[in-house]
Image (cartoon, coloured by chain):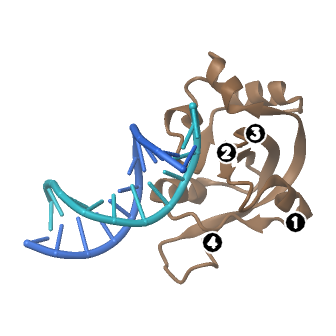
Chain colours: A brown, B blue, C cyan
Amino acid sequence: MRYWLFKSEPSTWGWNDQLAKGDTGEEWNGVRNYQARNFMREMALGDRGFFYHSQKERAVVGIVEVCATSHPDSTTDDPRWDCVDIKAVVSVNAPVTLDQIKADPELADMVLVKNSRLSVQPVTEAEWQRICALAGVDA
DNA sequence: GCCAACGTTGGC
DNA sequence: GCCAACGTTGGC
C-alpha cells in the first residue's frame, strides 16, 4: 500500500464535506496539474491518504482511502484529466499543522514543505507513521 | 491582502 | 521548441 496527501481549500471542499459523503466517497476532481494527475493514476484501491486543509488552517485533519482508481474527471470533457475517488476513514484526534511538520526533522523533507503548491502528493511510509503518531490515530 | 513561486498557454 | 505572459495557488 502507498500513502498520499490530498490538499483542499476548506472553503471549497473541506473535511466535513468529505465526511458527509461517508463510505460512498467522492471524486477528487478539478485537478488540472499533470504531476498531481499522474500521482492519481498511480493510486491503487485501498491506498491511504491524509486530507489537508490549505489556506488559513494549514493542517492534516483526516485520513482517507482510495475507493475508486483513476477514471475520467466528470467535471470536464477534456480527456487529459483523470481523478480517483476517495472516502473518509477517520478524523484525526489532533490536527497536525504545517508549522509542526516544518519544525519536525523527520518531516522537513515532505513534498508539502518542498513544493507547497502541489495538490496531490506522495507521502513516504516513515512520514505516514510519524504524522499518524502526531495526529493520535492508528497508522 | 500581498506577493513569490510555479505551471500552463500561446505566439513566434 | 522556446520563452514571455499570464493566471493560480498558498503561505505569510
Residue identified by numbered label 2: A5
Q: Are marks 4 and 3 in contact (CB under 8 Å)?
A: no
Q: Comparing marks 3 and 2, which lies closer to the viewer?
A: 3
Residue identified by numbered label 4: A71
Residue identified by numbered label 3: A60
Nearest the eye: C1 or A9 = A9
CA distance for labels 4 and 2 = 19 Å
Residue A91's x, y, as percent?
89, 44
What type is the residue that disc 2 sits on? Answer: Leu
State the image quarter where residue A111 is shown: top right
Residue A116's x, y, as percent?
54, 40
Residue identified by numbered label 1: A21
Residue A125's x, y, as percent?
68, 31
| In this picture, residue A131 sits left or right of residue A108 | right
Instruction: Give the crowd class for mark 4: few <14, some 14-19, many >=20 residues within 10 Å.
Output: some
Give SS at disc 3: strand
What type is the residue that disc 3 sits on? Answer: Val
Q: In the rendered view, tell whether residue C9 sits above or below residue A128.
A: below
Give SS at disc 2: strand
Q: In the rendered view, tell whether residue A72 sits above or below residue A3.
A: below
Q: Earlier in the sequence, mark 1 or mark 3?
A: 1
Q: In the rendered view, tell whether residue C12 sits above or below residue A89.
A: above
